[in-house]
Image: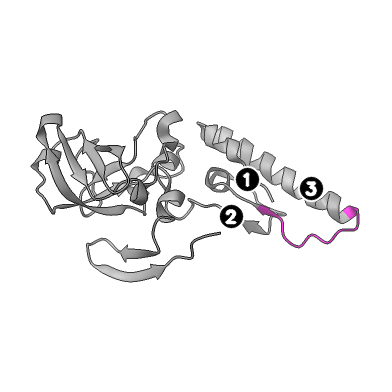
Amino acid sequence: MTHAGHSYAGRSAAEMARIAETERAGVTGAAERLRAAGHRVGIVSLGSSPTVLYAERLDGVTEVRAGVYMFGDLLQMQLGVHEPEDIALTVLASVTGRKPERQAVLLDAGALALSKDRSTQAAPRDYQFGRVLGADGTPCFGEALVVRTHQEHGEARGGEGLLDLHLGDLVRVAPNHACLTAAAFDRYHVVDGSRQVVAVWNRINGW
């Protein structure tokens, strides 16, 4: 089993593909050596979304454990794994306060909803604690970000039109790290191009 965590430092398709092949060759080579020594190796497992998506071959691998693979997030977007509009996981939040004196609004999504992960801090663009989107997931507030999080609420600033929001208005927040954000909830409310929930998928949390 491998996890090419160093792939997150990659910044080009060629570099990602090279790391992916190094990971694949390493784990399959280890499996071959174990088999040659008489051990049964049924599962050869690798993971990390960048290497899986940039891998040019996966022969010899029986399992892929790419965590952010199906959702995407603000860090993976900056690694070139997907486009901004392909982020499939967001947190729905309500406006609970307005702070015009500091050009901010308060949301009922804080550390317990978004996590404290600042994975984009070392990326080309730091998205603080998440990017604020419209209720339908479109980037209608420019580059508005959640810049501070407390336990139960977050503070959003920047962008255009943010201060036009009223108490109770809904927004969505795209996360830095989909894995930690998703782990804060016990289910997914699935939408498909609209605000109507078409399915509810339960999560299995905990260790």
Q: Which of 100 and 40 is in front in this view?
A: 100
User: How many angstroms separate mark 1 from mark 3 (CA)?
Assistant: 14 Å
Asked whether disc 2 touches disc 1, contact meaning CB atoms under 8 Å apart, the reply is yes
Q: Within the magenta stretch, is there residue 5?
A: no
Quadrant location of the C terminus? Answer: bottom right
**Going 23% across and 67% down the picture, which residue do you hit?**
196
Residue 115 lies, in percent from the top left, at 39, 46
- Marker disc for residue 30: 3
SS for dot 3? helix
**Going 46% across and 43% down the picture, which residue do you hit?**
81
Magenta residues span: 36-45
Q: For the residue marked with disc 3, what is the amino acid?
A: Ala
- Marker disc for residue 199: none
Residue placed under numbered mark 2 in the picture: 65
Residue placed under numbered mark 1 in the picture: 3
Residue 86 lies, in percent from the top left, at 36, 50
Q: Within the magenta stretch, is there residue 37?
A: yes
Dot 1 or dot 3: first in sequence order is: 1
